[in-house]
Image (cartoon, helix red, strand yellow):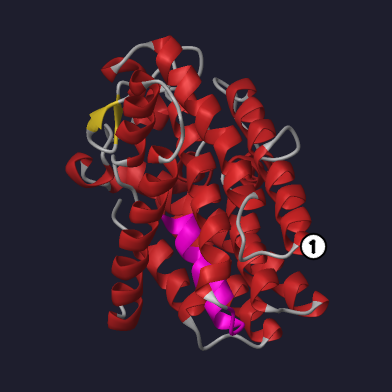
């Protein structure tokens, strides 16, 4: 990994963990609910979405103090989605990031409430932040609610469940991932750029960049489900096949999936060039996402 990116990731993950813990412990909530929320927050993860937001903000010369609240918010929503995705009524998974899933560690009702709490708290984190202008709060709330709601991530989860046991076209598969995974990634890149001062044309190209790294992220996820190491990816290899999900390797073969991954990476680089921020951490993140092992 690029040393500069490596240092950035380590520093920002630590900052994000500290900020999210501070936010959660400032809430007046029952101890069991707090423990359940913190269990999933502390399970770790790559923090790709908030780090992407901070990197986009930095690429356009923004102030990190103004970007940290929406960065925490998007990771809180991502964590809620993982808790709910693992539930028996959804993917029915027992392991997440190498640990028992939230509903296994606690119980199903507590896990549902922990997810609900994280989802709603994310918007409070944004709207109560003193470093953001009212205009920025409206923009962020509008974009985050769309990305995480019935037109975005929730739609993707619905499409994903409906597709189980079916053989999808590539277009159908991409539609699922643009919503389920890609919408929060899109929000992260666009939000960071917006707070950093990007103009409308630059935001358009950053949105295109985010679209392709969202697909890049998912195709690598599918590849790791075939060739990854269970100890690194934190879940059983082949779980997508077990759950009857369509994947890039299933549709295109492993080599075809790798070829598509490279195409997405190149399109993401072109979008950064159009936005005028090609030689930044945003470009390094393309390789990081493409080459990740977990």
List the single residue furthest toward the left. 231
Residue 203 image offset from top left, x and y in percent = 74, 72
| Disc 1: which residue | 135
The image quarter containing residue 180 is: top right
Magenta region? 47-62
Magenta segment includes 294: no
Magenta segment includes 53: yes
Q: Secondary structure at mark 1?
A: helix
Q: Quadrant of the N terminus?
A: bottom left
- Reply above or below: 87 against 292: above
- Reply above or below: 245 against 273: above
In the rendered image, is residue 288 in sight? yes
Q: Is residue 141 left or right of residue 88?
A: right
Residue depicted at 41% across the width and 11% down the height: 108
Residue 85 image offset from top left, x and y in percent = 48, 27
Q: Is residue 131 left or right of residue 7?
A: right
The image quarter containing residue 110 is: top left
- Reply above or below: 62 against 195: below
Residue depicted at 39% across the width and 31% down the height: 37
Of residues 274 and 243, which is closer to you in this image? 274
Residue 25 image offset from top left, x and y in percent = 38, 39
Residue 152 image offset from top left, x and y in percent = 70, 40
Of residues 124 and 80, which is closer to you in this image? 124
> Total marks drawn?
1
Which SS type dominates the magenta stretch? helix
* Badge 1: residue crowd in 10 Å (few <14, some 14–19, many ≥20): few
Of residues 27 and 114, which is closer to you in this image? 27
Residue depicted at 31% across the width and 27% down the height: 35
In the rendered image, is residue 46 in sight? no
């Amino acid at each position: 990994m690029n040393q500069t990116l490596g240092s950035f990731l380590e520093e920002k993950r630590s900052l994000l963990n500290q900020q999210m813990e501070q936010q959660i412990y400032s809430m007046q909530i029952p101890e069991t609910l707090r423990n359940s929320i913190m269990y999933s927050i502390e399970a770790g993860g790559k923090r790709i979405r908030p780090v992407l937001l901070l990197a986009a903000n930095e690429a356009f010369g923004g102030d990190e103090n103004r970007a940290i609240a929406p960065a925490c918010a998007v990771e809180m929503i991502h964590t809620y989605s993982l808790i709910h995705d693992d539930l028996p009524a959804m993917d029915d998974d027992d392991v997440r990031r190498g640990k028992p899933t939230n509903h296994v560690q606690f119980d199903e009702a507590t896990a549902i409430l922990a997810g609900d709490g994280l989802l709603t708290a994310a918007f409070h984190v944004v709207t109560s932040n003193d470093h953001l202008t009212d205009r920025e709060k409206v923009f962020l709330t509008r974009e985050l609610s769309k990305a995480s709601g019935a037109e975005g991530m929730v739609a993707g989860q619905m499409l994903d469940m409906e597709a189980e046991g079916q053989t999808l076209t590539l277009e159908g598969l991409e539609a699922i991932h643009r919503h389920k995974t890609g919408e929060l990634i899109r929000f992260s890149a666009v939000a960071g750029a917006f707070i950093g001062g990007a103009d409308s044309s630059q935001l358009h190209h950053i949105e295109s960049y985010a679209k392709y790294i969202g697909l890049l992220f998912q195709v690598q996820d599918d590849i790791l489900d075939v060739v990854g190491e269970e100890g690194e990816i934190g879940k059983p290899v082949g779980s997508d096949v077990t759950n009857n999900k369509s994947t890039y390797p299933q549709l295109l073969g492993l080599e075809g999936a790798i070829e598509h991954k490279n195409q997405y990476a190149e399109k993401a680089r072109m979008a950064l060039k159009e936005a005028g921020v090609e030689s930044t951490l945003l470009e390094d993140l393309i390789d990081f996402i493409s080459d990740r092992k977990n």
